[in-house]
Every structure is written in structure tokens, then in C-alpha cells.
Image: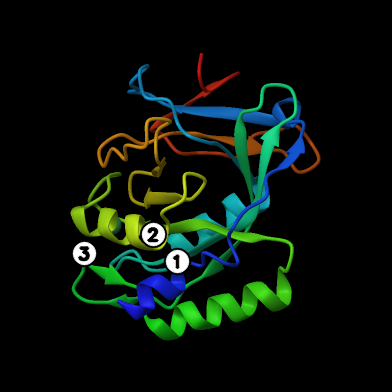
């Protein structure tokens, strides 16, 4: 289990949350069509449009196998409400090892190279989570996904995005405020506009809202 404890990144990821104004005024909220009003996410997720595009391009690069990568950015506390939020500023494609069509895992090499890249190219950012595709399987966390997430991304501000490229759908899995991680219940996100306030999100399982908790 040496790998697990090392990649837990306790040192690098011991986060100081910067206080900032959450950029709701520059964002479009997206909420699951079916949602559980009682489930409160531990963090609000902001995803830049540029990163959304790159994630979708990578997700569509192989429609027969699961592909994935890492989500990188910053953690904040909303200056007005004290609510934690994250901004996913970039993604890095990962060399996941594939073991069958529905079973991917991280390799030690991919994690080592990830941390080298983070330290060199993104010294002010942290590993906010991961994403992967479920071609023709739907948006959920398998038991294996849950295991990976709980072991490699144990912080409340770390998230797992699952994308189903055939139906154009996706959702974020993350802890709720009470610490539970529901493998069947995903959350939406805030699409952070680049320049113009024009949405580019096309996932059919999400619906636009002004505020995710509405
Ligand atoms: Zn999965």
C-alpha cells in the first residue's frame, strides 16, 4: 500500500483555501434532471469552458474503451458565504492501464509523471480529482471507481467526473457535506465562461439552473 499512501499527497495537497468571491456571475449552473434535493455537495464545482472542451475531446478519443485523466485547479472559500468551491482550470490526459473494457486503473508511472508535471508546470494548483468515460454504460461510480476515489482522492474537495460519450452525459461524484459518497447520485457543476456569456455544455442529462441548490 506504499503507492496509495504516497499518492494520497498529504503533503502537497494540504490545502489552504483561498478566500475569494465565488464567480457565479460569470458562470452557468448545470443540474441533473433527476436530483435529490437532500444531497448537499461538500464543494461547489466550477469548470472552465476550455477544460470542458478538452475533457470532451479526450472522452471522445476512444469510444470503445474507458479513457480518463486528471483534473487540476484551485480550492477556495466563498468570501460571502464561507462555502468551499473549486475551480477546475485544466485537465491532463492520463495513461490509465486498461484491464478489460470496463476496468481501468492508474499505473504508478502515470501517477509519478502526474506529480512531476504538477510541480513543474502548475506549482500553484492542486490535483482536484479525476475523470473517466463509461462508454454505453451510464453515469455512475462502480465499486471499483469508489475504491479508487476513496483511496486516491479522499479529500472533500476532490471529485470524480464520469462521462458517457454516446448519450452525451456526465456528472460529478463527490462527498456530501455529511461525508457520504453516493455512487448512484451525481452532481452538476458551474460552467465558467471564458469571455462571452454563451454556454457550450451539451450534456443531455443536465439542465441549466441559476443556482445548483435551487
Ligand atoms: Zn468507472
> Disc 1 versus disc 2: distance between alpha carbons?
19 Å
- Image coordinates of residue 25 in percent, x first then y, are 75, 25
Residue drawn at 22 percent across, 59 percent down: 144
Give the farthest residue toward the right.
195
Residue 135 visible in the displayed image? no
Q: What element carries label 3?
A: loop
Q: Residues within 10 Å of mark 2 (few under 14, many from 20)?
A: many
Ligand 1 neighbours mark 2 (CB distance < 8 Å)? yes
Colour mapping used in the image: rainbow
Residue 93 higher or lower than 147, as above or below? below
Taking the view exactly as shown, the residue that stands out farthest to the bottom is: 109
Instruction: Find the residue positioned furthest to the top.
Output: 214
Badge 2 or badge 3: first in the primary sequence: 3
**Residue at (37, 16) in percent of width and height:** 37
Say which mark, if any, is on residue 8.
1
Q: Which residue is drawn at 50% across and 39% down?
A: 202
Q: Does the residue labelled 3 lie within 8 Å of ligand 1?
A: yes
The residue beneath circle 2 is 132
Tell me whether circle 1 and circle 3 mark residues in contact (CB < 8 Å). Answer: no
Q: How far apart are marks 1 and 3 (CA)?
A: 24 Å
Tell which tag, 1 or 3, sits nearer the viewer.
1
> Is residue 66 or residue 112 the one in the foreground?
112
Q: Label 2 vs label 3: CA separation?
A: 11 Å
Q: Residue 104 occupies which quadrant of the picture?
A: bottom left
Q: Is mark 1 on a helix, strand or loop?
A: loop
Q: How crowded is mark 1: few (under 14 residues within 10 Å), some or many (20 or more)?
A: some
Q: Mark 3 points at which residue?
A: 102
- Against 214, residue 176 (above or below) is below
Residue 169 is situated, as x and y percent measured from the top left of the image, at: 39, 42
Which residue is found at the position 63% from the left and 78% from the top? 117
Amino acid at each position: 500500500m506504499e503507492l496509495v499512501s504516497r499518492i494520497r499527497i498529504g503533503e502537497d495537497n494540504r490545502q489552504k483555501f483561498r478566500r475569494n468571491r465565488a464567480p457565479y456571475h460569470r458562470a452557468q449552473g448545470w443540474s441533473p434532471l433527476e436530483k435529490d434535493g437532500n444531497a448537499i455537495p461538500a464543494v461547489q464545482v466550477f469548470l472552465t469552458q476550455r477544460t470542458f472542451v478538452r475533457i470532451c475531446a479526450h472522452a471522445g478519443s476512444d469510444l470503445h474503451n474507458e479513457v480518463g485523466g486528471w483534473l487540476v485547479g484551485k480550492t477556495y472559500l466563498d468570501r460571502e458565504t464561507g462555502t468551499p468551491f473549486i475551480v477546475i482550470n485544466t485537465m491532463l490526459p492520463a495513461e490509465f492501464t486498461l484491464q478489460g473494457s470496463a476496468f481501468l486503473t492508474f499505473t504508478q508511472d502515470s501517477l509519478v509523471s502526474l506529480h512531476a508535471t504538477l510541480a513543474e508546470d502548475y506549482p500553484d494548483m492542486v490535483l482536484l480529482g479525476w475523470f473517466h468515460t463509461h462508454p454505453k454504460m451510464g453515469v455512475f461510480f462502480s465499486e471499483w471507481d469508489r475504491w479508487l476515489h476513496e483511496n486516491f482522492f479522499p479529500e472533500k474537495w476532490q471529485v470524480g467526473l464520469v462521462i458517457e460519450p454516446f448519450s452525451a452525459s456526465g456528472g460529478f461524484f463527490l462527498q456530501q457535506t455529511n461525508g457520504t459518497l453516493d455512487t448512484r447520485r451525481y452532481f452538476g457543476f458551474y460552467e465558467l465562461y471564458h469571455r462571452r456569456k454563451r454556454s457550450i455544455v451539451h450534456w443531455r442529462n443536465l439542465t441549466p439552473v441559476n443556482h445548483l441548490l435551487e
